[in-house]
Image (cartoon, rainbow, N blue to C red):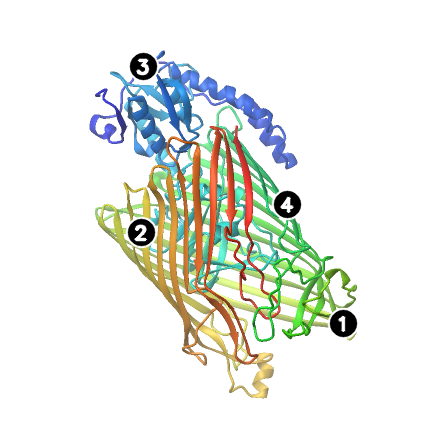
């Protein structure tokens, strides 16, 4: 090799073969597990980070030992250079290091893809600087004959000079790394660009190979913008609208329709962050994958807006630990601890524990949040072909709630302040969430594999003093509303969900194809009960004092039990018709069974009611075609659908056919700037058919059979528009995530044909988030923009029109690297302190959007 400076010879192995090194004793070592094992095992048992403080010191000693072993194969006493390379993606850092040091670095690009570095600064020898740069990456350098270095996975050898003894050994290491990359992990990538996703089809595909619009919020983007919740991340996701309901949570929409959620690709029927389920903290997550449009292939029954797949963090092969302290507006105090690595000496058992405490008040009077939780996961390699994993995730949150402020009777604003509280300060919500997960990953002959995952979720919720408003406000006097006690209630939601599939290649007609066969099951149970209050207290919105409310008196009780069971079987294949033409086809068949029991009881006695419904063998087909017309761009077309059972009955007393949402999409996806920046452009049309419409031809006798109004499956809604997305690196250290969405929704059939649909969602939305590491400094700066067109809620019969005009929210973020291990981040959201309504829900309540918020975070890596 030439000794001229060269930053990165990624094609070196292909041209010259795998590097040969001097032969030495070989073997395998792992960092001694004592500190981390004690910390993880103790913390998992107690739910606290016991022993975490002691682990870093010993781990540093272990790392030092590993580095010393590697250094014996490296030159000693080499030249001293001045380095200033920031934390970030490892491949970019190696490029800068090679230029600064004036040395060759030869390695396979796949070896460093998806890895990150904590950086290196100061005057160091070339060898010491390179070791420092690779610290914690799982890689180590080896000196090459004639000068320069190559890289390999850390030689876990008992002897000091462990090196691969053959080309085959080195190639095997590269293959393992390539396999790891395909799980799509974004932690440590330093990028806003996703590598792989399986949310659409269970196939490990790049976003470009997925024939649907898919957005990924990476760990780096969440960290850069101090995102603490799933809602924070989804507000930054192109095409998604977060319908806020105060501390009652949120509902998520895309393309005019609701969305459903998953954990690690497994159905989550309990939902997240609504009135009856706890929110999910971002500290537990590696990334959030958002598939937009109908997704029935893997979901079964659901809504056509799409699927939000929450992918959680997994244990790392090398020790790492960090803690973060955040303080912010409205008395926010947040502390996060995250420790991960091998537990036993062989490294075949790895663990991770994340713990969070997050308390704050609100910009609304009397409103608070006290929350804490932990997520622990252990992964074990039972054999080279078998891996098992188990985890526990728990969250506890205590809040009270403000559902917003009322409007005048005509829908105009009353000019109320953002801290206005219309509720009972004695009201308390307690939400809990516990999720147990077990999974098996089994490699089979001929590159096939079997995966099975089981989730058991428990979501107990209790509310004391839940209240609501009734009436309409006279704008001149402020009178017209009454506040009601609503009810106390308790729900004990639980569910079981199982997904199992087998996947692998198929050789046919001289080409290689991929197949997936799978099945899923879920059983969702919701027992509940409570006490109702029928008395109301008139209030004046201009003079209302929450502390003056009387004690509400119970007048009735209620209880019930809902159950939904789903079973599905699916198959999908990716077939290579030509070198540049691939087709994905598949289908799912679903069986759905639900029953409800509700008992209302007052002075007249109990009044029970029951219902049940079944759907058998409902098909949800999927088809997509991808044509690659250049090395960096592809065009695609796809069809997908999803169904949702209906509880309304027709004239004969039978349930209506399920609502079907069908998504048609064409687009182009590609990458530019040396594949560092992904782009996508999509045109879509989403049709929802069989919507229930009142059948005015029903006779009184038929209405008795229907149990009230009779319906017919006649209405149709059409939603169509455009999605544009950019994600990745513009240049070294400059990340960008941007998206624009246009959605036009209207009724395409039925009594409301031609009228707009879901005007409470914006037609136009733009989101831009960017962060730039300033070269030769310790500073990173960035900002984000969220812009939306007008939304409104109109009711001609009641004579009101509620609207929110076009809105732009701007945020800024700045980070300073105190040391290579410590960062200080300042985040300002709603920089210009815009006063706006988060949603336009109803006359009696719509929450204000968050005012200007400032937070300061200190992150320390051990």
x%, y% of residue 142?
33, 20
Please tell me whether mark 3 or mark 4 is closer to you in this view: 4
- Front position among marks 1 and 3: 1
Marks 4,1: beta carbons within 8 A: no
Q: Earlier in the sequence, mark 2 or mark 4?
A: 4
Quadrant where the N terminus lies?
top left
Q: CA distance from mark 4 to mark 1?
A: 44 Å
Can residue 164 be seen from the camera position used here?
no
**CA neighbours of label 4 inside 10 A, class few (<14), some (14 to 19), many (20+):** few
CA–CA distance between discs 2 and 4? 52 Å
> Can you identify the residue that label 1 sits on?
602
In the picture of the structure, the residue carrying the numbered disc 3 is: 23
Camera-side residue of 47 and 817: 817
Q: Which residue is mark 4?
A: 331
- 495 and 313: which one is in front? 313
Q: Position of residue 773 (x, y in %)?
A: 40, 37
Can you tell which of label 2 and label 1 is closer to the viewer? 1
Task: Identify which residue, 515 or 332, lies in the foreground.
Answer: 332
Task: For marks 1 and 3, give the CA distance.
Answer: 86 Å
Residue at the location (60% across, 54% down)?
277
Residue at 79%, 63% (x, y): give it.
Answer: 551
Category of crowding for the residue at label 3, using alpha-carbon neighbours closer than 10 angstroms: few (below 14), some (14–19), many (at least 20): few
Measure the C-alpha gap from mark 2 to mark 1. Answer: 59 Å
């Amino acid at each position: 090799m030439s000794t001229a400076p060269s930053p990165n010879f990624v094609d070196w192995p292909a041209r010259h073969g795998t590097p040969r090194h001097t032969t030495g004793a070989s073997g395998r070592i792992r960092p001694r597990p004592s500190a981390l094992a004690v910390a993880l095992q103790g913390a998992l048992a107690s739910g606290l980070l016991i022993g975490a403080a002691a682990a870093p010191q010993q781990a540093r000693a272990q790392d030092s030992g590993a580095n010393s072993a590697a250094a014996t194969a490296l030159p000693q006493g080499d030249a001293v250079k001045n380095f200033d390379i920031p934390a970030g993606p490892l491949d970019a850092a190696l490029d800068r290091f090679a230029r600064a040091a004036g040395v060759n670095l030869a390695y396979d690009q796949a070896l460093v893809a998806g890895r990150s570095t904590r950086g290196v600064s100061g005057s160091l020898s070339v060898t010491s600087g390179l070791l420092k740069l690779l610290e914690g990456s799982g890689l180590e350098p080896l000196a090459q004959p004639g000068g320069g270095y190559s890289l390999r996975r850390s030689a876990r050898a008992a002897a000091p000079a462990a090196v691969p003894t053959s080309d085959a050994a080195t190639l095997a290491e590269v293959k393992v790394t390539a396999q790891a990359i395909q799980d799509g992990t974004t932690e440590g990538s330093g990028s806003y660009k996703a590598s792989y996703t399986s949310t659409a089809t269970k196939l490990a595909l790049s976003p470009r190979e997925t024939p649907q619009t898919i957005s990924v919020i990476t760990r780096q983007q969440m960290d850069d913008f101090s995102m603490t919740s799933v809602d924070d991340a989804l507000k930054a996701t192109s095409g998604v609208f977060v319908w806020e309901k105060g501390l009652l949570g949120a509902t998520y929409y895309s393309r005019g329709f609701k969305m459903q959620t998953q954990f690690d690709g497994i159905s989550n029927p309990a939902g997240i962050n609504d009135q009856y389920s706890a929110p999910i903290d971002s500290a537990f997550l590696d990334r959030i994958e958002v598939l937009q449009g109908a997704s029935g292939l893997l979901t079964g029954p659901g809504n056509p807006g799409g699927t939000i797949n929450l992918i959680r963090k997994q244990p790392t092969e090398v020790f790492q630990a960090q803690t973060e302290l955040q303080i912010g507006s409205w008395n926010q105090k947040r502390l996060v601890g995250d420790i991960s690595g091998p537990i036993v000496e062989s490294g075949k058992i790895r663990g991770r524990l994340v713990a969070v405490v997050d308390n704050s008040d609100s910009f609304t009077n009397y409103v608070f949040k006290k929350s804490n939780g932990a997520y622990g996961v252990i992964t074990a390699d039972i054999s080279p072909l078998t891996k098992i994993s188990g985890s526990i995730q728990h969250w506890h949150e205590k809040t009270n709630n403000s559902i917003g402020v009322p409007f005048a009777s005509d829908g105009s604003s009353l000019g109320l302040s953002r801290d206005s509280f219309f509720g009972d300060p004695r009201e308390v919500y307690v939400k809990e969430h516990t999720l147990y997960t077990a999974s098996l990953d089994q490699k089979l002959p001929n590159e096939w594999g079997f995966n099975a995952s089981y989730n058991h979720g428990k979501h107990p919720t209790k509310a004391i003093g839940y209240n609501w408003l009734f009436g309409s406000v006279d704008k001149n006097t402020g009178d017209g509303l009454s506040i009601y006690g609503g009810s106390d209630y308790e729900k004990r939601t639980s569910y079981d969900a199982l997904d199992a599939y087998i996947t692998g290649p198929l050789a046919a007609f001289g080409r290689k194809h991929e197949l997936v066969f799978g099945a899923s099951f879920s059983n969702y149970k919701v027992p509940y009960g409570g006490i109702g209050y029928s008395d109301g207290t008139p209030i004046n919105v201009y003079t209302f004092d929450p502390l003056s409310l009387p004690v509400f008196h119970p007048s009735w009780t209620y209880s019930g039990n809902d159950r939904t069971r789903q079973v599905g079987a699916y198959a999908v294949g990716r077939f290579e018709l030509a070198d540049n033409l691939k087709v994905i086809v598949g289908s799912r068949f679903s069986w759905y069974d639900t029953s409800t029991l509700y008992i209302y009881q007052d002075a007249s006695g109990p009044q029970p009611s029951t219902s049940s419904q079944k759907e058998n063998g409902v098909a949800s087909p999927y088809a997509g075609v991808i044509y690659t017309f250049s090395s960096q761009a592809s065009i695609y077309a796809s069809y997908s659908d999803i169904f949702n059972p209906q509880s309304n009955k027709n004239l004969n007393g039978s349930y209506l056919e399920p609502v079907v949402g069908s998504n048609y999409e064409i687009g182009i996806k590609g990458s530019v700037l040396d594949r560092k920046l992904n782009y996508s452009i999509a045109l879509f049309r989403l049709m929802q058919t069989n919507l229930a419409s009142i059948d005015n031809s029903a006779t009184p006798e038929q209405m008795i059979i229907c149990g009230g109004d009779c319906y017919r499956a006649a209405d149709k809604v059409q939603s169509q528009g455009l999605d544009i997305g950019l994600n990745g690196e513009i240049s070294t250290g400059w990340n960008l995530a941007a998206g624009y969405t246009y959605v036009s929704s209207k009724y395409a059939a039925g009594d409301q044909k031609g009228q707009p649909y879901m005007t409470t969602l914006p037609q136009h939305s733009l989101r831009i988030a960017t962060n730039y590491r300033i070269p030769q400094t310790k500073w990173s700066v960035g900002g984000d923009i969220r812009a939306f067109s007008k939304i409104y809620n109109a009711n001609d019969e009641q004579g009101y029109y509620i609207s929110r005009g076009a809105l732009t929210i701007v945020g800024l973020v700045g980070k300073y690297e105190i040391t290579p291990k410590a960062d200080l981040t300042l985040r300002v959201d709603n920089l210009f302190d815009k006063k706006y309504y988060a949603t336009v829900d109803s006359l009696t309540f719509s929450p204000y959007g968050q005012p200007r918020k400032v937070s300061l975070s200190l992150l320390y890596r051990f």
